[in-house]
Amino acid sequence: MCFSAALALPSIPNLELSSSNSTSNWSGKDEDPNKSQAVKLSLPAYKWRFVIAYDGTRFSGWQYQQSTPTIQCILEEALTTITKLNRKDLCSVGASRTDAGVHALGQVGHFITPFNYETLEGVHQALNGLLPSDIRVREISPAVPEFHARFSVTSKIYCYQVYNSTIMDPFTRHYAYHSTYKLDAAVMRVAAGHFLGKHDFSAFANTSRNDRVPNPVKTIFRFDVVEKGPLLRLEVEGSGFLYRQVRNMVALLLQVGRQAVPPDIVVRILESRDRKELAKYALQVPPHGLCLETINYNEEHLRLPTDSPASSFGRHHSISYCKVPFI
């Protein structure tokens, strides 16, 4: 079964509106470009987009699993409590299936309800009240039927952090890989430039744990190596990424930064399309340095539907001051 931390549950008002009274014109099928994976929904149906951040240290990744604690599992537990729907009825989808130990600042997902909401602030507050402190919902918005958390994506941005010093900063130990080798950032930038453009990344992908055969051809729009004191940020934006592709690319760049291999080794390994070729030069880096920072979408799919509540970004609490007369 799915594990979650024991939490004191807040009193949650009945947030449902009767579906029979709904007059919204944004209900309908869950449409996406991949018609074979489209989810057909009975009318009426309302789609909700959320942005979520999490510290992945103690979780077994995003994807739902019955035997281990995952982000999707715990999020769906909270959603089923609030909506009173089964997880299958929620049809929740995440944009990226982050691995165990990987963090996220801007993971995006969507879920479905058969009823509309007048306001999303109460749902937002209730969700974060139920979730453990290392998972936070940053935003909830109504979504048009065309929006799909996975198939509407135009690009994803990941960042891998490396702490390059002889002594590790204890405050970043869960969020950065410690390299005691002095890294040459300039040479790493040259090597990172070879990843740019459209390539077959078969040599940088581990065998996937599912039965799908993904398209190995991806486009890398940018790959920056940013120095912030001893902290090195390797920021990569691409149309999509294969299983553990980012961590494998980073592993090779670290070998280049240590001057163990030349920058043009990237070209040779890309052209080989063979994962065994990469294994000759670099070992995979651990997951805790990796963070999913941003997911970009087709702007047309991000428009707000008509007859929908406003997006919720959380709300501030205010204090009512007592008016005490001066004596």
Image (tube, helix red, strand yellow):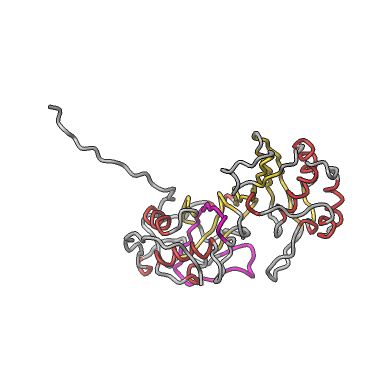
Magenta residue check for 98: no
Dividing the picture into quadrants, the one containing residue 258 is top right
Measuring 59% from the left and 44% from the top, which residue is drawn there?
A: 172
User: Residue 131, position in %: x, y?
Assistant: 44, 58
Q: Is residue 6 visible?
A: yes
Which quarter of the figure is the C terminus placed in?
top left
User: Residue 247, position in %: x, y?
Assistant: 71, 53
Measuring 41% from the left and 54% from the top, which residue is drawn there?
A: 124
Q: Is residue 202 left or right of residue 324?
A: right
Residue 93 vs residue 275, the one in the foreground: 275
User: Residue 111, position in %: x, y?
Assistant: 50, 63
Q: Which residues are magenta?
A: 31-59
Measuring 69% from the left and 39% from the top, which residue is drawn there?
A: 166
User: Residue 68, position in %: x, y?
Assistant: 56, 67
Residue 20 vs residue 106, the one in the foreground: 106
Dividing the picture into quadrants, the one containing residue 107 is bottom right
Q: Is residue 151 visible?
A: no
> Residue extending furthest top?
327
Compared with 204, 63 (above or below) is: below
Residue 150 vs residue 82, the one in the foreground: 82
So how many labels did they put on this image?
Answer: 0
